Every structure is written in C-alpha cells, then in structure tokens.
Image: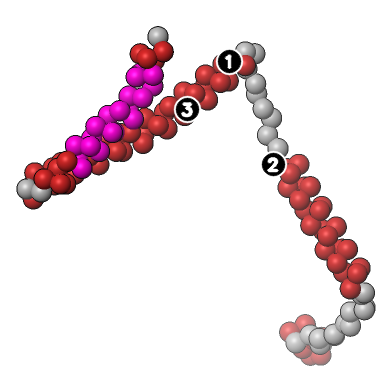
Amino acid sequence: MKNIIHNIIHPTHRTSKRLPMPENVRKSFRRYSCAVFTGATILGLTMPAYAANDPLTVVNNLSTFIFGLIRAVGLILLGWGIVQVGLSLQSHDPSQRSNGFLTLAGGIVITFAKEILDLIIA
C-alpha cells in the first residue's frame, strides 16, 4: 500500500525517444498545418454581406459615413483652434493668434464640407 501511494505522489518519469523525421517531411507538415489554419481562419471569419436592393443606397450610406468622419475631424480642429486663440489672448502672442484663427477657420470649413459641397453642386 505504501508503494502505491508513493508511486502516485512520486511517479517515475519515463522518457520516450522521438522517432527521427526527415527535414523535408517536417517542412511539408509545417506548410500543411499553416494552410489548414489559414483556411479554417478564413472560413471561420466570413460574414454575410447584406446588400441593399439599390446600389445607390450603398454608395449614399458610404458617403454619409465618410462625411461623418470628416465632420468629426473638423470639430476636433475647430476645438483646437478655439484653444489656440484662447491661449494667444492670454499670452499676447500675435503669431499664435493668427495660427489659432487659421485653425478655427479650417475647422469650420471642414466641419461644414458636405453642406458647402451641396450648395456648390445644387
């Protein structure tokens, strides 16, 4: 009984020797494994595309999304321009003030780019 408990607590380690494998077989197996993993990943990550009936709807949705991103960048520039103008008024720095007003004007133009383009086109 003591030997059984001892063997459970302290098992004897048996080392097994690997069989020799040629280098070309090893490289082929690696390539095969990578191909299977890549294929499984591609098949596992596919998503169905729900297309609208009208292709123009897709283009309009993409245009709306892109102009939303442009508007976000314009608002960030607008805020940064306001901060620059405020700092220039505090430090009495005319060059920073002109840069602030230029950034402010650029932010306004970028923020309202879609509306400006609609006015020009229509």
Query: Dot 3 lies on which element?
Result: helix
Magenta stretch: dominant secondary structure: helix
| Region of the chain picked out in magenta, as a range | 99-117
- Asked whether 53 falls inside the magenta stretch, the response is no
User: Given contact means CB atoms under 8 Å apart, are the residues at marks 2 and 3 in contact?
Assistant: no
Residue at horizontal 92%, vertical 75%? 21
Looking at the image, can residue 83 be seen? no
Q: Nearer the viewer, residue 25 or 83?
A: 83
**Nearest to viewer (mark 2 / mark 3):** 3
Looking at the image, can residue 14 be seen? yes
Residue at horizontal 92%, vertical 74%? 22
> Label 2 belongs to which residue?
45
> Label 1 belongs to which residue?
56
- Asked whether 112 falls inside the magenta stretch, the response is yes
Query: Dot 2 lies on which element?
Result: loop
Number of numbered markers: 3
Q: Locate residue 20: give its quadrant.
A: bottom right
Indicate the amino acid at tag 2.
Answer: Leu
Q: Nearer the viewer, residue 36 or 2?
A: 36
Label 1: how many Cα within 10 Å (few below 14, some 14–19, many 20+): few
The residues bearing labels 1 and 3 have C-alpha atoms spaced at a distance of 14 Å
Q: Position of residue 8 (x, y in %)?
A: 77, 82
Is the residue 26 above or below the residue 52 in the image?
Answer: below
> Label 3 belongs to which residue?
65
Q: Quadrant of the N terminus?
A: bottom right
The residues bearing labels 2 and 1 have C-alpha atoms spaced at a distance of 27 Å
